[in-house]
Amino acid sequence: MRVLNFGSLNIDYTYSLDHIVAPGETITSQHLEVFPGGKGLNQSVALARAGVPVCHAGQVGEDGGMLLQVCQESGVDTSRIRTVETRTGNAIIQVSAKGQNSIVLYPGANREQTQEYIDQVLEEFGPGDLVLLQNEINLVDYIIQRASQRGMTIALNPSPFDERMLACDLGLVDLFLLNEVEGAQITGHQNPEEILEEMKTRFPKAQVVLTLGKAGVCYQRGEIRLRHGIYQVPVVDTTAAGDTFTGFFLGSLLRGQPVEEALRLASVASSLAVSRKGASSSIPTWEEVQRADLTCQS
Ligand code: RIB
């Protein structure tokens, strides 16, 4: 199975602050760092560091060279990434002393994909291949439709959730990777139990991975339900924790691990990511995850 990740590539401007700025407040950050990021890029890097070959598709501007370089250094195939005239997408990220973040996104080139470009990329993929998607690019609905017509398996992380997600034929998705907020936005339910029940009713064939913050993660396939707890680590920066989870969960499954072990490895990987600064730069390697000696809080 080949993996195609159609996703965003962002330059992250990360400001360290005592607390996240409140409406009307002005605060000075003593620390600005520039990191490679974007949910798409982070998930490709996580897959590659989990040891799974991944081909990334998406768009950058002329200023996106460092993003291509980071992907390549991590082993991501960047040959389908297109450089366009519009500037690269960016994110203004505030990180508080407690490691919490707040993000403003400017989509730039990420949202200027055309149907022709998408068709051209998908032409090379077909039955047995998997496409991974998030919601920081345009035409996600079109990619889902065309990938399904080509017989590809579709994995969707509907993040950041907005009304464009509701325009997608979610019935074509084989694997959802989502958090409680996104689960609530799709199903209209707040309670995790009800979210999972509604997902099962509406998308009976899909696997669902629902992350629950401090309560860990829940996996559902039909009547099968599995849970995994979180690990205790010092929280430095939560940026890309979810992306790391997604990449390592998928990567572990593709490496032939059972779902229980994929949940464990993904949880370890995302815990390591929150204990480090930055987006893709915080993502551990497969070996680091294997070596990690963390205590699970179930
Ligand atoms: O999920 C983390 C990512 O969200 C950051 O890297 C930032 O670019 C935003 O897209």
Image (cartoon, grey):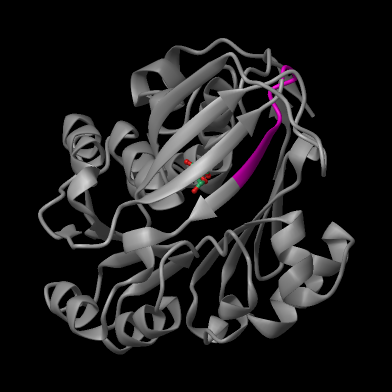
Whether residue 196 is visible: no
Q: Is residue 167 above or below residue 256?
A: below
Where does the image place residue 104, in percent across and percent down from the top left? 59, 49
Whether residue 254 is visible: yes
Q: Which quadrant is home to the C terminus?
A: top right
Where does the image place residue 290, in percent across and percent down from the top left? 43, 19
Q: Is residue 73 magenta?
A: no
Q: Which residue is drawn at 56% across and 73% down?
A: 206
Q: Which of the pair 81/268 is nearer the observer?
A: 81
Q: Which residue is drawn at 47% across and 33% down?
A: 13
Q: In this view, does 295 lie above or below 143?
A: above
Where does the image place residue 115, in percent across and percent down from the top left? 26, 84
Where does the image place residue 124, in percent across and percent down from the top left? 11, 73
Q: Residue at x 43, y 59 (%)?
A: 107
Residue 227 appears left or right of 122: right
Span highlighted in magenta in the image: 97-103
Q: Which of the pair 106/7 is nearer the observer?
A: 106
Q: Residue at x 76, y 46 (%)?
A: 212
Q: Which of the pair 231/86 is nearer the observer?
A: 86
Q: Which quadrant is home to the N terminus?
A: bottom left
